[in-house]
Image (cartoon, rainbow, N blue to C red):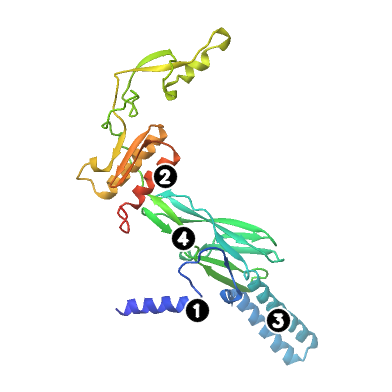
Amino acid sequence: MAGVLHALYKKGRDQWLFQLRDSEPGTVTLTMRRVFIVPTRAGMMFAVLLLVMLVGALNYNLGLGFALTFFAGACAVADMVLTARNLALLQLAPGRAPPVFAGEEAQFDLYLRNRSRRDRYAVWLGFQADGEPRQAVDVVAGGDSAVSLSAPARQRGWLVAPRVRLVTRFPLGLFKAWSYWQPDARVLVYPAPEWPAVALPSSGAASEDGHGTVGLDNFAGIRPYQAGDPMRHLAWRQIARHDPALGGQLVTKHFEGGAVAELALDFAALPLQMDLEQKLSRMTGWVMEAEQRALPYRFRLAQHDYGPAHGEAHRAACLQALALFGLDGQR
């Protein structure tokens, strides 16, 4: 109980002290109140050096020593101001975050916009949970810069972008200024495809055009094209070999056996002994294989019934249904 209370106290203290937000939609401007600054180790050593120089100048009554000490101190103060201004008034905006599969690295595109007349140098960015930022970017006056940060996608569903930490020590490195930003961005994480892959199912409804979408057709040969033949049956390799000057014509592939099974990916037809995540992984693998082979397929998952079709939009709809199945009341 004491540990929980301490964690809640620490979280509340950090939120108040460092101006932490849960989510910040749209473009965010780093005001001076959101920029924090402390001396670095080099800055602390420089302060000790200034103290030694001041003591020496006092003991020996050295005018030049006083001048050098105050000049170095003024440089340190100027460095503190310039370091804080290197972050202040930067504008931050989230970019696109493409979907990934569980086990991969999610990529968050972030944009830094500098609407001031000063160039911003050596601004380091990284997720707060990763420790010290490892990516640096410069932002010219009136320009934009983009940076991509990665985070592990360990499980399916929506992955919210972690809190971003911005750090700079420019120009002299005597001070470190930092700020926090919680971008309003998230990545859709699909289930990881099953490995090793399992063959596509061969059961389903009959297809009226006689085209075997599961690869079960009996190929009978090549014949001249006839009006009404599906365009997907055209034998392009043989057509390319015919010389039009010698009376070349369109030819099509001929299949025997009439109607064959249509490819149907049905969640309810999976073995009962498989757990939920295994079923979703198998369905994901089937969707990816069907798309790779350009096979139209019907997709059934609870109330979701798509197809038969194939293509980017069909693939995205099926994978999103798999990613969100059973999460937050979504079925």
Residue kind at label 1, given as amino acid type: Leu
Tell me if 211 is positioned left or right of 271 in this view. right
State which mark lies toward you, 2 or 4: 2
Residue 294, placed above or below residue 276: above
Q: Tell me the SS state at disc 4.
A: loop
**Mark sitting on residue 316:** 2
State which mark lies toward you, 2 or 1: 2
Q: Position of residue 295 (x, y in %)?
A: 38, 32
Disc 1 packing (10 Å; few <14; some 14–19; many ≥20): few
**Mark sitting on residue 17:** 1
Residue kind at label 2, given as amino acid type: Ala
Residue linked to disc 4: 161
Q: CA distance from mark 2 to mark 4?
A: 21 Å
Q: Position of residue 72 (x, y in %)?
A: 72, 79
Total marks placed: 4
Q: CA distance from mark 2 to mark 1?
A: 42 Å
Q: Quadrant of residue 316?
A: top left
Residue linked to disc 3: 73
Furthest toward the top, the residue is 246
Q: Position of residue 307 (x, y in %)?
A: 36, 38
